[in-house]
């Protein structure tokens, strides 16, 4: 809903950004000292900014990472 000039914005009025939906194909990236790898998987949960998401990779394993962009998930080593 529109805000009036000077109106205070409350946390309940804010929405978390969704980078992708469950079922979307996403790019997985992992970086460390001297290496960078990437691959693809299928999101099991929606990619909400600041919240971990789960992704199924080709082998059937499930990995957890942080959404960092449009259909991109960063996996920590």
Image: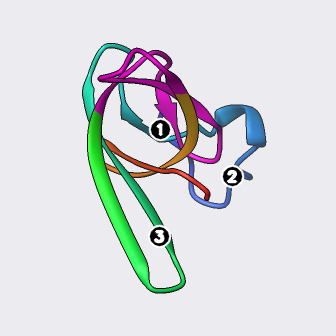
Q: Position of residue 45 (x, y in %)?
A: 50, 18
Q: What are the residue bounds of the magenta stretch?
A: 41-62
Residue that appears at 40% across and 14% down: 60
Left-right relation of 57 to 76:
left
**Badge 3 is on which residue?**
31
In this rendered view, identify the residue nearer to me: 55 or 10: 55
Which of the pair 19/52 is nearer the observer?
Answer: 52
Assign a secondary structure to mark 1. loop
Q: Position of residue 30 (x, y in %)?
A: 45, 60
| Residue 7: numbered disc | 2
Q: Which label's residue is closer to the chain start, 3 or 2?
A: 2
Residue 5 versus residue 44: which sits nearer the camera?
A: 44
Identify the image quadrant of residue 52.
top right
**Residue 13 position within the rendered picture, expressed as x and y whole percent measured from the top left:** 65, 35
Identify the residue under disc 1. Answer: 2
Q: CA distance from mark 2 to mark 1?
A: 10 Å
Q: Residue at x 76, y 41 (%)?
A: 11
Of labels 3 and 2, the one closer to you: 3
């Amino acid at each position: 809903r529109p805000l009036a000039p000077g109106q205070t914005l409350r946390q309940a009025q804010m929405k978390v950004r969704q980078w992708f939906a469950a079922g979307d194909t996403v790019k997985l990236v992992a970086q460390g000292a001297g290496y960078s790898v990437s691959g693809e998987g299928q999101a099991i949960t929606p990619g909400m900014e600041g919240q971990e998401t789960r992704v199924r990779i080709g082998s059937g394993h499930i990995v957890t990472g942080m959404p960092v962009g449009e259909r991109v998930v960063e996996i920590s080593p």
